[in-house]
Structure formats: C-alpha cells, structure tokens
Image: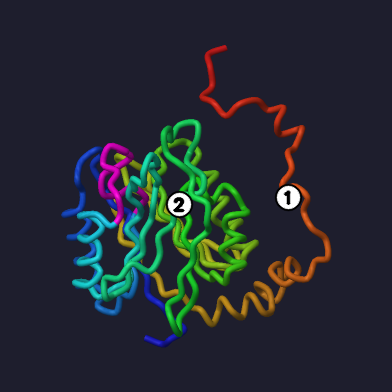
Amino acid sequence: MSDNIFTLAGLQLNLSANTDNFEHIEAQVMAAKRRYPHLQMVVIPELATFGPAPRYAAKLPCKTDKKFQQLARDASIWLCNGSLFERDGDHIYNTASVYNPQGEVVCRHRKLYPFLPYEEGISAGTEAQVFTIPGVATFGVSICYDLWFPETTRSLVWQGAEVILHPTLTNTIDRDTELAIARASAATNQAYVISVNAAASIGVGRSIIAGPGGEVIHQAGDQHEMILIDLDLNYLRRVRENGWHSLGQPLKSFRDAAHSFPQYQAQRSASLDALGPLAKPKTS
C-alpha cells in the first residue's frame, strides 16, 4: 500500500461479560487478516477481553498482555487491544495498549476520565498518549468517556495526532450523543476518529468512523461487524492545510490565537463548584 494509505479494521465484536473473550478476539483478528491480507491495524472495543470487571485487573505486563503481543506478531499488524484493567499499587486503571507488528508495546493510555459516578474504584490517568508509525501518521488513543471532554482530543492533536483510536464500551441511551461528539471531535480537530463499540449484547454497537471534516465514513448497526477502511492521509493533510472543502482551518486558527483560556489554569470555578458533588443521582 502507499505510505499515505493505511488500512485499518474496527472489530465491533459480540462479547460475553465477566468471562475471558480472548480466544474469540484472537479468532476474529486472524479472520480479518486472512480475509484482507493488506490489513495493517485492528482496533477492538474497550474492555473487550473480560468485560467491565475490575476483578480481572492485573499488573502490566501480564499474561493477557503477552497474548496480545503474540497476536500482533502472528497477524503481523498494529493492534489496539481496546483496554484492560491495570493494577498499579493501590490503583486500578482502565488502560489501552497498542502493539506493533513485532509484538512490542508502543503505547499505553490510561483512561483520563472514568465514567463517574458509575465506573467506581477506577483511577484516572494523567497523560494523553500518542505514538507514531514512521512514514504513515501519528495516532492518539482515547477511551470511551474521554471523548466527552474536548480537551483530551485537542491535547492529542496538539502532540501531532492525525488519527484518534477510540475504543468504547457503551450500552446506554446516550450513544446518539457519542456519535455527535465523535463527528464534532473529528471536524474541530481535522482528524480521523475511529470509535469502535462492542456489539449487542454487552454494547449497543453503532461504531462510527468520522473523517477530518466530521463526515460519516461508516456507521455500524448493533450486531457483529468487521469495519474495513482505508485512511487517506494525503486527504487529511489537504484538509488541514486548506480546510474541508476549502472552508475553515480551525487548527491554524487555534494555533495563531493570541488569547488564553483561564478555565484551563489552576483555579476553581465558583459556578461549577455550585453543581455539588460528583455522585449517583438519588430518588427525589
């Protein structure tokens, strides 16, 4: 393939909760590679291996991590494992790992915004993580609720990210909102957003691939689906240089603005403090 075309597959998998799904994941990754020998990267959903079960948390690298390393080697692909719960001392993080075709870990991203107040007992990461595939592009990693905070995607793009890998595990009514956020994040950051959700029954599916103008390249249904896409990096770079359809150039405007944003400085907001504690709603 051309250096400026990169072939990626998002696997919207039908998974079981609270059990080991690795063999199913492995079979689906290898099936994708057999069907599409030119495939270069696979992204799977958040917490795909064990579901949302913190009791499976383990210190990284762990046995499952090593299995993913071997899978990347066997398929000769770049592989984003969705995420695993990582134990680090007294903390548990929701951590996505990316492996290169040699099985080496090139990126680990700890979810910056656990889905509070419901994702209880999970600590927040502190750094937005990117990695570069030489001669191709720089990729950023974002997990599920991270995307609801525009600062996270902007911090990835500020570091050079052109493609946002966004594994998610959503089984709630707000997937419509997430689709809008994915498109808006792609448009405002002139990036590809690859949002891969789990299929029914543990997720609602509807994975989305959005282009750098916010356009929908593909939106899945709610069942198992293998989503194959050619990322055109020349197209993305033209959008960043000239604007989508030669219109706005938001990254340049953001870069060149003379003002700063006090809400991002080390100070509290009285209006936000007045919202009260971050806690589960109570019966009226």
- Amino acid type at image mark 1: Gln
Q: Quadrant of residue 226?
A: bottom left
> What span is colored magenta in the figure?
45-60
- Amino acid type at image mark 2: Ile
Q: What number is the disc on residue 143?
A: 2
Q: Distance between the residues labelled 1 and 2?
A: 24 Å
* Residue at 27% over, 37% down: 55
Residue 138 lies, in percent from the top left, at 49, 73
Label 1: which secondary element: loop
* Residue at 30% over, 50% down: 59
Q: Quadrant of the C terminus?
A: top right
- Describe residue 58's horizontal placement relative to residue 146 as left or right: left
- Describe residue 90's horizontal placement relative to residue 35 as left or right: right
The residue that mark 1 highlights is: 265
Residue 277 visible, this angle:
yes
Label 2 environment density (alpha carbons within 10 Å; few <14, some 14–19, many ≥20): many
Tell which residue pokes out farthest to the front in this image: 89
Tell which residue pokes out farthest to the top in this image: 284
Label 1 environment density (alpha carbons within 10 Å; few <14, some 14–19, many ≥20): few
Between 230 and 93, the one lying in front of the other is: 93
